[in-house]
Image: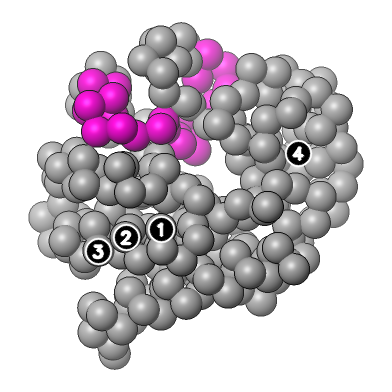
Amino acid sequence: MKKLVAYITSSYPDSNFTIDLANKLSESGVDYLELGIPFSDPVADGPIIEAANLKALQNGFKLEHLFTISKEIAPIIDTLWMGYFNPFYHKGLDTFIKEASSSGIKGFIIPDLPHEEALKYKPQIEAANLSLIDFVAPTDSKDRVEKIIKDAKEFIYMVAYAGITGSGKSENLQELIANVKQVSNTPLYIGFGVNEQNAKEKVDGVDGVIVGSEFVKVLLDESINYTQKQDKIATIAKNIKSRINE
């Protein structure tokens, strides 16, 4: 069974909405929830997710909101915190580890933390039974792929192209997939540019898909109410999960 990871922006439009949406996504077949930590400079994300980040911050998002809602969400669906390293550094990695452990979070996705830097923090994170998700990209050599993923936990995040999320570029990934599969049995999921229309094509050769902008653009749609947003996102999730397993 191919897996679906769904990214949503934490506490946008508000915290109660995020908790309710997490419930809906779990019921819709989503396997992991990637709970985005709003940040003012989300360098790996495209304009859709960036807009949701900024709106959440304008609405008064604080890390305490993330910690509080995670206690409600993590028992419902396997959840990871996705955020840039700045908040982890300023709040203190110890605090994030403590809060993640107490709420049942599975681990962290930190896209701007290079592999060499991540090695400094992995032992501390893994000692708490949490995972720090590893990234591979089409620009990585075979030797570098092996170096990055030899101890990968939970799943490996394969970036579909060099660039930002949601831009819909396309690259031949078969060589990268083969390089990963040669050295690791950890599930390999593809992210960046995955949507309802191309999910079946994107999942070829990998174990699952990571979808973000497709969901977040619904969060930003001010023409529909909260219930309609949740229902629409749930329907998209069901359709993607069905298509990747046809």
| In this picture, residue 246 sits left or right of residue 26 | right
Label 1: element kind? helix
Question: In the image, which is nearer the foreground, mark 2 or mark 4?
Answer: 2
Q: Residue 148 placed where, x, y %?
A: 67, 22
Label 4: element kind? loop
Task: Give above or below for 67 relative to 142.
Answer: below
Q: What distance separates the C-alpha of mark 2 from that of mark 1?
A: 5 Å
- According to the picture, the residue beneath numbered tag 4 turns out to be 139
Q: In the image, what residue type sits under mark 2?
A: Asn
Q: What distance separates the C-alpha of mark 4 from that of mark 1?
A: 34 Å
Q: What distance separates the C-alpha of mark 3 from that of mark 1?
A: 10 Å
User: Farthest residue toward the bottom?
Assistant: 223
User: Where is residue 21, by image quadrant?
Assistant: bottom left
Kindly check if marks 2 and 1 are in contact, taking CB atoms under 8 A apart as contact.
Answer: yes
Q: What distance separates the C-alpha of mark 2 from that of mark 4?
A: 37 Å
User: Where is residue 186, by image quadrant?
Assistant: top right
Q: Which mark is residue 23?
A: 2
Highlighted range, magenta? 97-119
Task: Give above or below for 183 relative to 2.
Answer: above
Residue 14 visible in rendering: yes
Label 1, residues with CA under 10 Å away: few <14, some 14-19, many ≥20? some
Q: What distance separates the C-alpha of mark 3 from that of mark 2?
A: 5 Å
Residue plotted at (11% across, 55% down) = 60
Kindly check if marks 4 and 1 are in contact, taking CB atoms under 8 A apart as contact.
Answer: no
Residue in front for this viewpoint, 128 or 147 = 128
Q: In the image, what residue type sits under mark 1?
A: Ser
Q: Which mark is residue 20?
A: 3
Kindly check if marks 3 and 2 are in contact, taking CB atoms under 8 A apart as contact.
Answer: yes
Task: Give above or below for 51 relative to 3.
Answer: below
Residue plotted at (68% across, 24% down) = 149
Residue 40 visible in rendering: no
